[in-house]
Image (cartoon, rainbow, N blue to C red):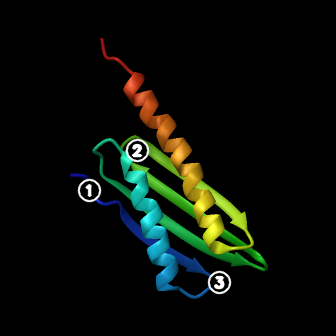
Amino acid sequence: MTTPIETTFTFRNMDSTEALREHAMDKIQKLDKYLTRQTASAHVIFKVEGARHITEITVTMRGGQFVGTETGTDMYASLDAAVHKLEIQLSRNKDRLKEHKPH
């Protein structure tokens, strides 16, 4: 059984919504398959700058820190795109760890 990713949220220039938090938690928990039995924490920042909705997700684990940032006109779409960027980075990292063969 894997440990859930400890997640914190920051909302800048916007109100906190429970629906956005739940959507983010659902998406972030899917990243768990890339963590190879490690504990990890995630910090999600939602920002609104004019018409731009910016989502920045930082995942910190023993192997390093991974950041996914996306800007769009819809907060949910930018969240999904930022999570997708993190999936690519974490998948690549997991493959590197798997390919490493100690002598």
**Residue located at (44% from left, 75% from top):** 22
Rendered position, 88 above or below 75? above
Label 3 Cα neighbours within 10 Å, binned few <14 / some 14-19 / many ≥20: few
Mark 2: secondary structure: helix
Look at mark 2 in the image and give the residue it sits on: 34
Residue 102 falls in which quadrant of the image?
top left
The quadrant of the rendering that contains the C terminus is top left
Amino acid type at mark 1: Thr
Look at mark 1 in the image and give the residue it sits on: 3
Of the residues under marks 3 and 2, which one precedes in the sequence? 3
**Residue located at (46% from left, 84% from top):** 18
Mark 1: secondary structure: loop
Q: Residue 92 carries which label?
A: none
Comparing 28 with 67, the one in front is 28
Tell me, yes or no, whether the two marked residues, 1 and 2, touch with CB atoms within 8 Å.
no
Rendered position, 69 above or below 66? below
Q: Where is residue 93 in the image (x, y as percent from the top left)?
A: 47, 36
Q: Is label 3 or label 2 in front?
A: 2
